[in-house]
Amino acid sequence: MNQHLSRIIATLTVAIMSAPLLFAQKRLEAPAPRPLAMAVTMHADTQAADSSANERKPLTLQQALALAKQNSVQFQAVVTDSRVAQQDSRQALASLLPSATFNTSAVYTQSIGPGLGIKFIANNAVHEYISQGNVHEVLDAASVATYRRAAALAAASKARADIAARGLVVTVVQNYFAVSAAEQKLEAAKRTADEGQKFHQLTQDLEKGGEAAHSDVIKAELQSQDRKRQLQEAQLSLLNARLNLAILVFPDFNDNFTVVDDLHAPVALPTRAEFEAQAARDNPDIRAALLTLKAADQEVSAARAGYLPTITLDYFYGIDATRYAVNSTLPPPDNTKYSNVGSAATAAFSWELWNWGTTQSRITQAELRRTQTKRELSLAQRTLLSEMRSLYAETETALEELSGLQRSAELASDSLRLTTLRYKNGEATVLEVVDAQTTFATANAGYQDGAVRYRVALADLQTLTGVLTNP
């Protein structure tokens, strides 16, 4: 009994002592940490599962436009440049106004000897303390022209920000309604896939009854497989369309949304006269070109101002004395107290008479840049006329074709239904049914693409007029 108890105690002792070694061995044999790519994939899969589990939030076109303006890096870069240009204009204006500064200094000069004066004749005393406020103003024509140039450039930069904003609108509209079109195409693909499966089953049933040939079954099966592949492609297209919009609109990876604006809602096209009037008045490209030309004119004026004189005005108030004190006392026997605080004013007139042609060279440079700016303005005007005609014609064509595409989609749907019924009654061939299915898929896709084309064409008009038609 004692021997048996001793064996049990020895076994337990060995097990307890070997437990840390076994635990360390298990840690060494543990699988390696997952690589970063696998972690990112698992995170994306988890987020996608959470996104599908939660209810998708509705997203209107106006909300998408507002979010894109907040989160677009390219657009915010243009806005930043515009704000920087506005600060340049503010700094140029501030340079025209008087400036006020306060200066304090002390000058210690070596003296020749007691009561004999100082060694540096330019200094006033052995100990000199200067503590003064200074109001400084420079009057010259170049500063005025520089301010006007900075103001014109700031306005031109703001116009370019408007151009970027309207270009962003086109991109958002295209991606937004691409999602809606992809959803419509997916629904059509589901219907054709279902029709293909039902037709395949129908041919099998008719073959069993001796009413259809086996070749019809083969053809129907091939068509059914093709429709299934088209359904998968439609699902992939919708996923890509949603991701493209999500990247453009949201600051993080978020696809938990659903578009709510109707792709096929009727949207009126403005008349040509209204469109041309708005484009001539509000086109940001022309406005930016005009403001850039104005800035070039001011650059020439600033360069020519180099031939004019400059007047500098200064007013000083404070202390310039041998003691750093408000009051001082005359030496005996007078002992009269007096104030060290006083004021002074200076005016300087400067006129550069010769600089080896530097001013004329600057004028030539500015005139060359102004000539190039005039060319760019002329090009912008010609481009506007061309785009006005082209974009309006594009929008008109898209609108006129849209009604025809809608009618084609409706007819293709009825044709598919009637052709399938005729095949059941033995009045149509399998090729007619397959052709009807293909026609329906093509017509429906064309109708969705036509609706997106019209919406994007309307958004393109905004780049010329600045007026976005109600989406």
Image (cartoon, rainbow, N blue to C red):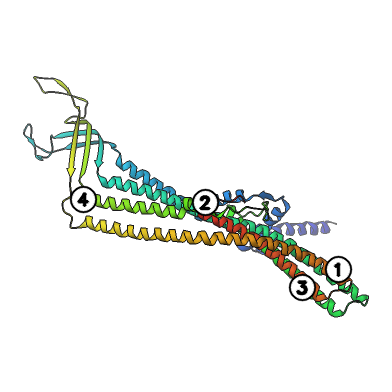
Under circle 1, the secondary element is helix
Identify the image quadrant of residue 339. top left
- Visible residue check, residue 239: no
Q: In this view, does 55 lie above or below 112?
A: below
Q: Which residue is drawn at 67% across and 55% down?
A: 263
> In the displayed image of the protein, which residue is found farthest to the left?
116
Under circle 3, the secondary element is helix
Give percent across and percent down for residue 295: 35, 51
Amino acid type for the residue under numbered disc 1: Leu
Q: How many labels does the image show?
A: 4
Give percent across and percent down for residue 348: 18, 40
Amino acid type for the residue under numbered disc 2: Gly
Answer left or right for 448 relative to 209.
Answer: left
Q: Marks 3 and 1, how far apart in space?
A: 14 Å
Give percent across and percent down for residue 427: 87, 74
Q: Nearer the viewer, mark 4 or mark 3?
A: 3
Instruction: Name the residue that disc number 4 marks.
Output: 307
Instruction: Name the residue that disc number 1 marks.
Output: 421
Mark 2 crowd level (few <14, some 14–19, many ≥20, 10 Å Cα): many
Instruction: Name the residue that disc number 2 marks.
Output: 466
Identify the image quadrant of residue 378. bottom left
Q: In this view, does 417 lie above or below 460?
A: below
- Closer to us: 67 or 321: 67
Mark 3 crowd level (few <14, some 14–19, many ≥20, 10 Å Cα): some
Q: Which residue is drawn at 40% across and 58% down?
A: 377
Tell me which label, 2 or 3, sits earlier in the chain: 3
Answer left or right for 321 relative to 80.
Answer: left
Tell me which label, 1 or 4, sits earlier in the chain: 4
- Mark 4 touching mark 2, by CB under 8 A? no
- Mark 1 touching mark 4, by CB under 8 A? no
Instruction: Name the residue that disc number 3 marks.
Output: 435
